[in-house]
Image (tube, helix red, strand yellow):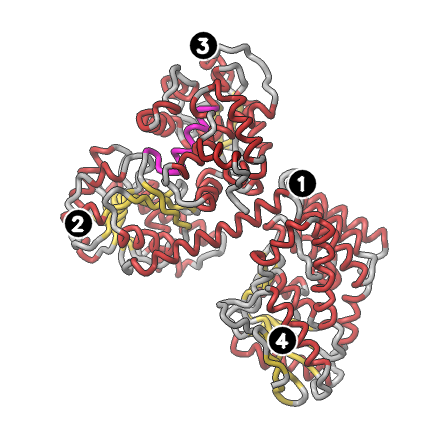
Amino acid sequence: MIHSGNAITVQMLSDGIAEFRFDLQGESVNKFNRATVEDFAAAIAAVKGNNDIKGLIVTSGKSSFIVGADITEFGDNFAQGEAAIAEWLGPVNNIFSSFEDLDIPKVAAINGIALGGGFELCLVCDYRVMSTAAQVGLPEVKLGIFPGFGGTVRLTRVIGIDNAVEWIATGAQKKPEAALKDGAVDAVVAPEKLQDAAIDLVKQALAGKLDWKAKRQEKLDPVKLNPLEQMMAFNSSKGMILAKANPAQYPAPKLVLDALQASAGLTRDEALKVEAQGFAKAAVTPQAGALIGLFMSDQLVKKISKKHEKNAHPVNMAAVLGAGIMGGGIAYQSAVKGTPIIMKDIGNPQLALGMKEANTLLSKQVERKKLTPAKMGEVFARIRPTLSYDEFKDVDIVIEAVTENPKIKEAVLADAEKSVRENTIIASNTSTISITRLANALQRPENFVGMHFFNPVHMMPLVEVIRGAKSSDEAVATTVALAQKMGKTPIVVNDCPGFLVNRVLFPYFGAFDLLLKDGADFQQIDKVMEKFGWPMGPAYLIDVVGIDTGVHGAEVMAEGFPDRMKPSYKGAIEIMYDNKRLGQKNDIGFYQYALDKKGKKAKKVDPVSYELIAPMVTGEKREFDNQEIIDRMMIALCNETVRCLEDNIVATPNEADMAMIMGIGFPPFRGGPCRYIDQTGVAEYVALCDKYAHLGKAYEAPQLLRDMAATNKKFYG
């Protein structure tokens, strides 16, 4: 053994070729944490000191290659400021460069995921062989930063400016065919042939059949384009990238483009300094803080879900009651992720609708080449339509997805319970009705939970798992496990009107109604909130959700929280409903809708909307200051999020923020309501609440925030 460390071993194979193997002890994946970086330096020194080594293959002892840098460790450096961040990167880059500078050929054998720092390590090697099971990429922009271990420098020189810009500025994860086509890897082979292929490349290099030194030199020299060609390449790339990423919301793509352009004419070591300075600028932006925080919250949510596994029982067969669009979507999601599911309804027309929905979703997967026709048939066969409960003895969990009416749900749930085993879990997909109330219709309330999917099921990542007063740990855990198996992110919440997401969303709609009452223009509100980062403004959103759905939800919220969600006036949303304007459901709401050339519903302004709203306006019709609109909309939403933490509806700020981002499209680059309060400053946010407290209870700062402000505490850090 030439070197044996906590993260890396180096041992001789044969013919002067050694294996440089990453296998971080005590971890399920390889990553560049402090321990790995230190061991990397020690392993390089060991190779330098051994004259018998003529070439290296770089391998992994894990099923993945290297998943990237450990952001939970390196993130600590980001609090030190721009200069300190750039300085920290210098020694790390020196280690990577010293490996690149070893005067022997080096081949990376990429067996699995190689992302971020993991792929930057591959770029340091002279050649790269990729398994057909692997994926590579530099996804750092998704965290608000960009590659900092030489990725921008080396990839630009390996695959050219245009390709490198697309890889780095979009953070795309590349499959073998795409990586080979762009020249990021030199060969793609079957997994079982990977090591032999890597060894063969080293042997060819040693035999002089491959000019490995010329390959390395390309990465040390400036990009091989003259200044005019460089300018043209970057200008065309900038137009494409910045059209997709608003620099005010996501500054990292613009910053990386600037760094790439500034360093293209420089040698490697000079270019690495430019990369470090640009990385440091990105790392100190609030967007990077929010997006890195989201990544860490996502990891925490996954850990919390994993803890439930010990109480869960296996789900080998599921069932869904109700074969509408929602039921069909649930059936599709279960089947496509491998769990057979029975779909029951009371009539053949209803079953046909549910099966049509599943078929439509599967057909789209075939069109996009995500599924083969044969695979589609296999998945579709996992959905069994039925009019009876005859097969329900084999079902491990039943998901009720009938109309949002408590009496109908209670009757359906009671019928289902009679037809299943005593340990079968029953879940309701209700979006507003109390789980504790619905449980009263059951003989075994301990087996009952809420499982709230968001529409459209196949696209929305969140599932709220609602614990009723009598729900058992096993029922909750099994539902969490099924949601994960279905490819969703489950967040467990306690029972209350609207649960978590809808309870927080309706004060936002209430703030919208109040702004209209005070004389605001709904188009201005939409534009301001979309510029703030929401995928759609509140008027457009309620049209998409369905105005009838919104009115029903508002009634439930008003009954549950009358002090802040029961207005003393009829709002614009209710006025639209009274005038049979349901939004996109019947193509008329705040806006009118008609199909565009792509077959999608496009909105246009309807003057009648203003006529209908006019009688409710008590304030002076005026253009509001944009910041006032933002403050009034966001305070109502953020305050209710905090109240959900106060009431123990949701356990952690991390889960609350993730739920709002995945459930209602809270702008990811702002990190969620709790992080938004942190970045505003808790004391400053409380002062804003006080400024608008005259508008009603929804705007009054919760006591938790006042206590935090008094003790200078934050939700994070």
| Lower position in the chain sequence, tag 3 or tag 4 | 4
Question: Based on the displayed image, in which of its 4 quarters is residue 110 positioned?
Answer: bottom right
Mark 1 to mark 4 CA distance (whole Å): 38 Å
The residue that appears at 54% across and 71% down in the rendered structure is 24
- Residue 181 % position (x, y): 65, 63
Residue type, mark 3 in image: Pro
| Lower position in the chain sequence, tag 1 or tag 4 | 4
The residue that appears at 85% across and 51% down in the rendered structure is 228
Q: Nearer the viewer, residue 680 or 232?
A: 680
Relative horizontal placement of residue 465, taking residue 698 as reference (left or right): left
Residue occupied by mark 1: 247
The residue that appears at 28% across and 54% down in the rendered structure is 341
Relative horizontal placement of residue 484, taking residue 259 as reference (left or right): left
Q: Which mark is residue 615?
A: 3
Q: Which element is circle 2 on? A: loop
Q: Is residue 309 above or below residue 679?
A: below
Q: Is residue 407 above or below residue 516?
A: below
Residue type, mark 2 in image: Tyr
Of badges 3 and 2, nearer the viewer stands 3
Residue type, mark 1 in image: Pro
Which residue is outermost to the front? 711
Residues shaded magenta = 497-511
